[in-house]
């Protein structure tokens, strides 16, 4: 398949794999399989399969619009299920690329983790008894409320979801300088950013990924992979699902 016919997501993911030095094959045929995974990537002694799913730009109608961002992610998981149905012996990942759709919130932890592990809600502590409680009332806490797509006995072949993102480094540096200097005007912050990072700082873009681990995966995606300077990873840390990795360059932005 010629390079020019690949989707934006495929081009970006392939560029990322090359930058990280991961050996891969595009649309490798497998004996006895009718489908070809987009990318077969060898990590250590294990081959992982990746299917890249793009979301096309949308045109928003005028006026008030209520969005539900969950279906866009669910649709990509369903497509991955269909693509990988005959690859049960392989660990698989779905890679998501947003080409300008406002309802495809692939970078928002609350949205993506809510799809993977169940919609995020809140536990509200309620005291029932006579008189004041003997102990202080626990604080309001966030919790997964059900409807999870990744479960101990469901979709365990999925190692992770992966979000491709293009990071506007210059804009983030400008924003960080303004945050660190609350009284500074935009003009002065812009001048200081130019002084520190060059006159064309505003145009700098960097490719990164966010890895959303499946804690129930039969074969996890190793944590010493997909860990570039502009990458992030969310997974299980103790009893909590939280950010477990932040690349050194991305950490600069707070």
Image (cartoon, helix red, strand yellow):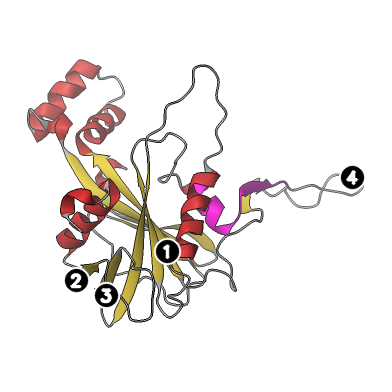
Residue 86 vertical position relative to residue 100 in the rendered view, above or below: below
Is residue 232 toward the left or the right of residue 89 in the image? left
Q: In which quarter of the image is residue 187?
A: top left
Residue 131's tag is 4
Circle nearer the N terminus (1, 2): 2
Instruction: Tell me where residue 79 appears, x and y as whole percent.
Output: 47, 57
Is residue 100 toward the left or the right of residue 26 in the image? right
Q: Which residue in the protein does label 1 denote?
A: 160
Magenta span contains residue 114:
yes
Residue 19 can be seen in this image: yes
Viewer-nearest of discs 2 and 3: 2
Residue 128 vertical position relative to residue 222 in the rendered view, above or below: above
| Label 4: element kind | loop
Give the Cα separation between the discs numbered 1 and 4.
49 Å
| Label 1: element kind | strand
Q: Which residue in the protein does label 2 denote?
A: 23
Residue 249 can be seen in this image: no
Q: Which of 83 and 48 is in front in this view?
A: 83
Viewer-nearest of discs 1 and 2: 2
Residue 56 vertical position relative to residue 251 in the rendered view, above or below: above
């Amino acid at each position: 398949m010629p390079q020019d016919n690949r989707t934006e997501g495929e081009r970006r993911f392939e560029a990322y794999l090359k930058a990280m030095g991961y050996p891969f094959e595009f649309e490798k045929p497998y004996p006895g399989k009718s489908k070809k995974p987009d990318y077969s990537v060898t990590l250590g002694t294990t081959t992982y399969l990746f299917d890249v799913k793009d979301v096309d730009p949308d045109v928003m109608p005028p006026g008030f619009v209520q969005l539900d961002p969950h279906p866009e992610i669910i649709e990509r998981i369903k497509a991955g299920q269909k693509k990988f149905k005959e690859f049960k012996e392989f660990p698989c990942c779905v890679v998501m690329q947003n080409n300008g759709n406002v309802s495809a919130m692939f970078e928002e932890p609350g949205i993506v983790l809510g799809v993977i592990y169940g919609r995020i809600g809140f536990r509200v502590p309620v005291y029932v008894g006579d008189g004041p409680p003997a102990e202080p009332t626990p604080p309001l806490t966030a919790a997964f409320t059900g409807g999870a797509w990744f479960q101990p006995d469901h979709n365990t072949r999925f190692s992770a979801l992966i979000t491709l993102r293009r990071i506007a480094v210059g804009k983030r540096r400008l924003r960080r300088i303004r945050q660190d200097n609350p009284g500074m005007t935009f003009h002065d912050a812009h001048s200081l950013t130019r002084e520190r990072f060059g006159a064309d700082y505003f145009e700098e873009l960097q490719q990164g990924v966010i890895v959303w681990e499946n804690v129930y995966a039969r074969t996890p995606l190793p944590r010493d992979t997909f860990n570039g300077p502009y990458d992030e990873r969310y997974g299980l840390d103790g009893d909590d699902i939280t950010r477990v990795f932040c690349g050194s360059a991305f950490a600069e932005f707070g």
